[in-house]
Amino acid sequence: MCGVVGVMAYSPVNQILYDALLLLQHRGQDAAGIVTEEASYLYTHKAPGLVQNVFHTRHMRELRGNMGIGHCRYPTVGSSFSEQEAQPFYVNAPFGIALGHNGNLTNSEELRQTLFKTGMRHINTNSDSEILLNVLALELERAVRGSETFDAQAVFTAMDALHRRCRGAYAAVALIAGQGLVAFRDPHGIRPLVVGRRETAEGPSWMVASESVALEALGFDTVRDVAPGETLFISRDGQFFSQIFNGPTRLIPCIFEYVYLARPDSTLDGALIYDTRVRMGAKLAEKIRSIPELSDIDVVIPIPDSSRPSAMELARVLKIPYREGYVKNRYVGRTFIMPGQALRRKSVRQKLNPVSVEFKNKVVLLVDDSIVRGTTSKEIVQMARDAGARKVYFASASPPVRHSNVYGIDMPSQKELVAYQHDEAEIAREIGADALIYQDMQALENAVRESAPALTEFETSCFTGHYVTGDIDAAYLAKLAQGRSDTARPKTWAEEGIQ
């Protein structure tokens, strides 16, 4: 999961890109970068750390031009502690192309070997995003050579070839020096991408971003989501072109975006994230109501922040008081991507602190969006007990996470997932809860579908083990697990203390 943004305007775009990345900061805190274009020159600044720490006045002055792209990085497959991994990536031929990518290519090693064997492209990092950039550059070079001109059709020809070669999840923005801005989404539409427009005296300005919140907060009207397999080309003079891949396409968005990843004030593929989470809470409440043993709940307490809408609606439906029982320190990173159980336990205690009065002598229902490793849940349950709770029930707004995600969410290896080969009673004992309630898979899908009826299917692999691209086997997952275990995982920049 990363955040990407691209802008074409009639005035300098450096501030717009910076502001957009701040709005997408939740999608990646490891590194940030911006590339702009003026008179066929590309200007770049990228570095490890949060957006506000990466860019200073001197950097912003150097980012000249009326079109550009930005990226905030969340470490996924192939990550390592190297500044070379920061995006956008750049190649100088043809034209000079910069690219920012959200997702993960599932056939990146095959593509790497092909590029190497042809001798046409050299890959400098372990990132699949650099491979995606080089495939784009190679296919664009071929398309322009074949037509003897650069135009929108050359871009679409190159993208058709890219879609046929690349598998996995990708929502990307690319800047082509002297030509324009390209944005594209994989044929399954796994990762989100939204396009917006703002009218100016000179003509329409365009923005493409991972979430609608980046558009709306900066004065752009949301036009629509980029369709699965669709490519947008916005020329440097503001002309807008689009074409959908001429191969098979199906909209199958990642359901974890609605559970946890996206901001609640975003709308993705027609579904308002906040509304979907409220509906998740209502459906979870109905399940809890059907369990007589849970009729003694005194208070509902969310695990901040993303579970709040679900917890509030759950409490309303069950007519049980809702209270804020944990205060969150916003300057501690996501615990499920941190290496080592000891570090994760310490991080949870630094991240959350209980308000004792809300727990003392009460039967507490804790509500979280999901349970991944279980380390966070176990510490949170213990904190509730230490604060004086008589009983602690734990509810998850999503089903058990039992499988690895291969489409851009760096979850642990499968064996490190607390739900792997365990039933609910065993997981409850592991995290120390008196009872554990998971959302049913069908209920989760219905919660999103009721908000956006046009959504008929979802990418649910971390819950079901079904991988929609059809190219994931046991050998792939075994290799993935080697790189995701606690012992193998390299530290991110944030974990190294570089800000």
Image (tube, rainbow, N blue to C red):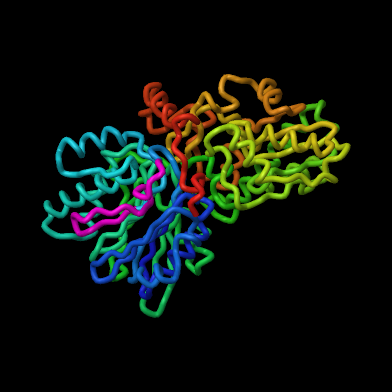
Position of 162 with respect to 86 (left or right) is left
How many numbered marks, from 0 up?
Answer: 0
Residue 87 among those drawn in magenta = yes
Q: Which residues are magenta?
A: 80-99
Pick whichever, 215 or 355, lies toward us.
355
- Outermost residue, front direction? 497
Q: Position of residue 306 (x, y in %)?
A: 63, 47
As displayed, is residue 25 above or below residue 449? below
Residue found at x 25% / y 63%: 177
Residue at image location 33% in from the left, 62% down from the top: 44
Residue 458 seen in render:
yes
**362 up-or-down from 65: above or below:** above
Q: Position of residue 432 (x, y in %)?
A: 72, 27
Residue 194 visible, this orientation: no
- 43 or 12: which is nearer to us? 43
Residue closest to the far right: 361
Residue 65's quadrant in the figure? bottom left
Which quadrant of the view contains residue 199? Answer: bottom left
Residue 312 painted magenta: no
Q: Position of residue 456 (x, y in %)?
A: 50, 39
Q: Nearer the viewer, residue 395 or 147?
A: 395
Looking at the image, which residue is at 63% across and 31% down? 374
- Residue 37 found in image quarter: bottom left
User: Would you place residue 213 above or below residue 64 in this image?
Assistant: above
Residue 336 pos. (x, y %): 56, 37
